[in-house]
Amino acid sequence: MRTYVIEGQLFYGSVEDFMDAFDFKEALEKVIIDVSRAHIWDISSVQALDMAILKFRRDGAEVELVGMNEASETIVDKLAIHDKPGAMDKLTAH
């Protein structure tokens, strides 16, 4: 199991650093992404979160997203695909 703790503001300008923080080559059974010290601002950051979650799931890891503040949860609920039917198909289409 690996826990990634995300800190700071996540928006279009920080998405590349966000994605670089993950080791997608490590074979894991469970990944926890802790965003209790972060704020998700826009669709770019939601898409990056989706991509990270779906990449880990594609490789067989169970992924748990924890600690989201209310404002971040609102935008993620509205825009994210990682928790919607067919999400994995959308990832593999890219």
Image (cartoon, rainbow, N blue to C red):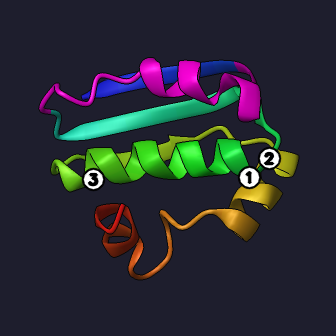
Q: Is residue 43 visible?
A: yes
Between 94 and 36, the residue placed more toward the observer is 94
Magenta span has 30?
no
Per the image, label 1 sits on a secondary structure element best described as helix
- Residue shown at 67%/41% (left/top)? 45
Per the image, label 2 sits on a secondary structure element best described as loop
Label placed on residue 83: none
Region rendered in magenta: 8-27
Crowding near the residue tagged with mark 2, few <14, some 14–19, many ≥20 C-alpha atoms within 10 Å: some
- Report which residue position mark 2 lands on: 42
- Report which residue position mark 3 lands on: 57
Question: Which quadrant would the N terminus be assigned to in this image?
Answer: top left
Q: Are marks 2 and 1 in contact (CB under 8 Å)?
A: yes
- Residue shown at 36%/54% (left/top)? 54
Name the amino acid, label 3: Arg
Is residue 89 shown above or below 48?
below
- The residue lying furthest to the bottom in this view is 85
> Disc 2 vs disc 3: which is toward the camera?
2
Is residue 57 shown above or below 49?
below
Is residue 37 shown above or below 69?
above
